[in-house]
Image: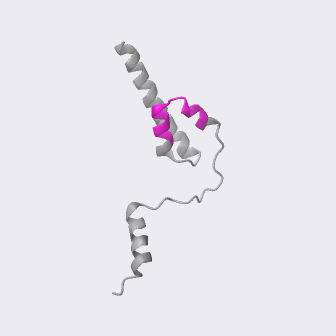
Amino acid sequence: MFGVLAIYGMVVLVALVAALLLAHYKQRDPSAWAFMSFLFPPAVLLLLFLPTVKDRARRRKPGWDERDDRELEREYGRGET
């Protein structure tokens, strides 16, 4: 029983690393693909067959601080210092 769990754990870790590297190469979100491959290791096969994103200058998601700054600027305008 413990051997099966150990083998499954190694398969999950290999799938996670493969998904991270492959998603980065294909210009996709590496953290999302790593999470999906951790839960369902055959998701790496789906990623393998997906095409590479052509738009290399894809939009970056703003962080929490940037979103807060934008909301404050929108509500109160730019600081008068």
Asked if the stretch drawn in magenta spans residue 42, the answer is: yes
In the image, farthest residue toward the bottom: 80
Magenta portion: prevailing SS class: helix
Q: How many marks?
A: 0
Quarter of the figure that contains the C terminus: bottom left
Across and down, in percent, residue 20 comes to 49, 40
Q: Residue at x 45, y 33 (%)?
A: 38
Q: In this picture, which residue range is highlighted in magenta?
A: 33-47
Asked if the stretch drawn in magenta spans residue 34, the answer is: yes
Across and down, in percent, residue 71 comes to 42, 71
Q: Is residue 51 left or right of residue 59?
A: right
In the image, farthest residue toward the top: 1
Residue 79 vs 53, above or below: the answer is below
Residue 9: image quadrant is: top left
Colour pattern of the rendering: one colour
Q: Is residue 27 left or right of residue 74?
A: right
Q: Residue at x 63, y 50 (%)?
A: 53
Across and down, in percent, residue 78 comes to 41, 82
Q: Residue at x 49, y 37 (%)?
A: 36
Quarter of the figure that contains the N terminus: top left
Q: Residue at x 46, y 39 (%)?
A: 35
Residue 64: image quadrant is: bottom left
Residue 10 vs 73, above or below: the answer is above
Residue 70: image quadrant is: bottom left
Across and down, in percent, residue 41 comes to 50, 29
